[in-house]
Image: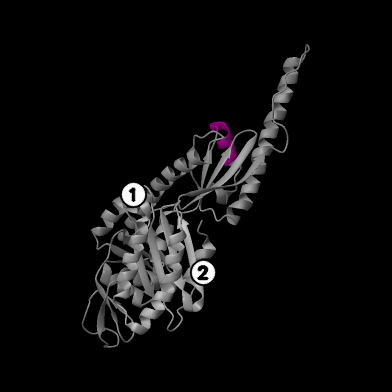
Amino acid sequence: MITKADVDYLTERKAVPGSPVLSVYLDIDQSKAANLKRRFEASLKDMLRSIEKQLDEPRLKNFVADAEPVREYVSRLEPRAKGCLCFSDASENFFWSREIKTPVPNQARWGDTPYIAPLLEILDEYERYGVVLVDKAHARLLSVYIGEIEEHFDALAPAPVRLVKTTGTDHILSQRRFQSKTETHVHWHLKHVAEVLDKRVDQYGVDRLLLAGPVEAISEFQQLLSKRLRGRVVEKLSLPIKASLAEILEAALRVERDVERQMERDMVEHLIIGDAHHPSALGLERTLHALSEERVWRLIYASGFRPEGGRCSNCGMLFAKTEGSCDYCGGSVNRIDDLIEQIVERVLDQDGKVEQVGGDAALRLQQVGNIGAVLRY
């Protein structure tokens, strides 16, 4: 599972002069016929060969050294996931790899820094969800992230919770007393779980919460949550306390997709409408202009948007045009094939946020130029 520390490590890795990094995203999904019988290795070879053809002899030697650890890793790989990510820089003794259970497109880049734009798009699509299953006597906490599920603890009530029947002429009164004790124990149990959860959500980096279990139990449990945790609850699920990991994962991913799509629709509408506190820039040219002024707080672009563009050979400014002179320093503008990736990297360098949207939100964003930004001022 990819952690926040992993992402920070890759994002913060600075360029080393004369020492590029090879970044590889490889589709290894065994449900696809194209990847069976290890044909994903052929896909890797094709991507690497495509880069090799563009290199002169001195740079080719460095590239081959960077590619070798990737080739070796993939040759030993027994695919159990859908995607594989590798970053390699042999001259710096740097190699990082992960398998993830979400689809990735086949891509390979050799550049100054790790090519993390596709990874950020994946992470944006899959926030970390916490799933809490509770009943009157038990509780389970699980996290769901990038298509994977992990169980963190199984907590029992601090005291037995059961209804005890008694005999005798006063058994009705006695039952009522025991019933009252049972309700008290249930309350203690749920309160204890709520307190533990309040500490654990930060430890596990949970963004949103799903509550599951009997209706009565989760209703009381939700009321016992702290204000900050109640604000993270997005859905209640009908699942038994002993539900399997597969059942919990399926239910959580279904909710996650629905929540993400609705958030994206709301985000795009807010971008288009704008407000007095956070003005918007719509379309590629206006977004790039705001980026040059370091005003972008949140970049939003449609999935699949791959615009043409250029970069000044002198000052490095980005443009929607592919040739001509720079509007800032007069230098020559040269065509680049990865304009959207460079925009994303610069927004992150400026401590901005990046959101890629799909579905209905992407269709709506296409109407105003496929891309836009909520500005700092």
The residue beneath circle 2 is 9
Closest to the camera, between mark 1 and mark 2, is 1
Horizontal and vertical percent for residue 237? 49, 37
Q: Is residue 218 magenta?
A: yes
Residue ID for mark 1? 32
Which region shows up in magenta?
A: 214-222
Residue found at the far top of this picture: 169
Give the quarter of the image for residue 282: bottom left
- The circle on residue 163 is none
Q: How many marks?
A: 2
Question: Would you say residue 275 is visible in this rendering?
Answer: no
Dividing the image into 4 quarters, which one contains the C terminus?
bottom left
Dot 1 falls on a residue whose secondary structure is loop
| Residue nearest the viewer, comparing 247 with 259 | 247
Is residue 218 positioned above or below 311 on the image? above
Q: Amino acid at mark 2?
A: Tyr
Q: Dot 1: few (<14), some (14–19), or many (≥20) neighbours within 10 Å?
A: few
Q: Is residue 128 visible?
A: yes
Above or below, 21 relative to 175: below
Name which of mark 1 and mark 2 comes first in the sequence.
2
Query: Which residue occupies the foreground of this view, 203 or 20?
Result: 20
Question: Is 249 inside the magenta-drawn segment?
Answer: no
Q: For label 2, count other residues whose C-alpha is less than 10 Å away and answer few (under 14), some (14-19) or many (20+).
A: few
Image vertical order of residue 160 relative to residue 70, above or below: above
For this rendering, which residue is in front, 148 or 108?
A: 108
- In the rendered structure, the answer to whether residue 278 lies left or right of residue 369 reads right
Horizontal and vertical percent position of residue 210: 51, 44
**Residue visible at 46% across and 63% down in the picture:** 73
Spatial CA distance of label 1 from label 2 is: 32 Å
Q: Amino acid at mark 1?
A: Lys
